Amino acid sequence: MNNPKSTQLHKILLAALAFIVASTTFSACRRKYTPLPDGYFRIDPYPESYQRTSLLQPFISFEVSDSATVVLRNDTSQHKNSALWLDIRYPRYRATLYCSYHLLRNNLDQLLAESKELVYRQSIRPDAIRAGSYEDDQQKIYATLYDLSAESATPIQFVATDSTRYLLRGALYFDEPGKSDSIAPVVDYLTQEIIHLIESIETPAR
């Protein structure tokens, strides 16, 4: 015949063991379901506030976001036939818009053809490229914006010209490749920034 006290102690020990096992299992499960860190790209845009960059004066000026940093990579005083290179950096999105400014020397058609060739060469799906045109006859601005899709290394490119004095072209690159569905909202936002840049171009009076 079992001792009642021994039986009760046995039950207490079993209950304690079960509690320990359950606690350990629950703790292990919680470790497995630690929330993942935030995604790499942030898609909430800055407030719309702009600064006019004068780094390319006396040739041209335009507006960029206050959140961007602009760096001129060569001296405008030395600019005759070679291009001027300007980097517009968006630190929050780890993206850079690489721009080049060209003086026209009866070579507009050649530069436009080169720009189009670069677009199609850098696209992974040339058949999916979308091109949109912009014209402002009053300001003498004529531009084409190329959408190469978020899968491309450079998803957005553009070319803008007054057809007689200058041609400005740019290509957007991210520091690191990302999945198209995660960077697409960022590409959409930066596309609007590029459109604003084009629409804000000013050149000295003739």
Image (cartoon, grey):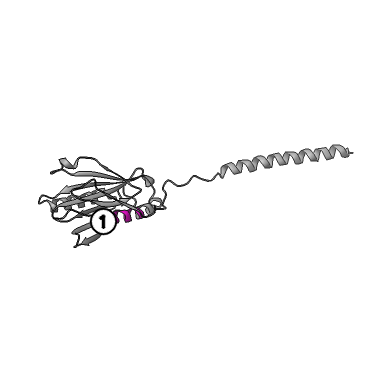
Question: Going by the image, does 29 lie left or right of 92?
Answer: right
Res. 80 image quadrant: top left
Number of marks drawn: 1
Residue at figure coordinates x 88%, y 40% from the top left = 4
Question: Residue extending furthest bottom?
Answer: 137
Residue range (magenta): 189-201
| Magenta residue check for 59 | no
Q: Secondary structure at mark 1?
A: loop
Residue 72 in percent (x, y) is at: 24, 42
Residue type beneath disc 1: Ser
Q: State the predominant SS element of the stretch in magenta.
A: helix
Of residue 103 and residue 172, the one placed in the foreground of this image is: 103
Q: Which residue is mark 1?
A: 200
| Magenta residue check for 200 | yes
Residue 136 in percent (x, y) is at: 21, 61
Question: Going by the image, does 93 lie left or right of 63?
Answer: right
Residue 121 in percent (x, y) is at: 23, 48
Of residue 144 and residue 86, the one placed in the foreground of this image is: 86
Residue at figure coordinates x 81%, y 38% from the top left = 10
Q: Classify mark 1: residues with Cα within 10 Å, few (<14), some (14-19) or many (20+).
A: some
Quadrant into which the N terminus falls: top right
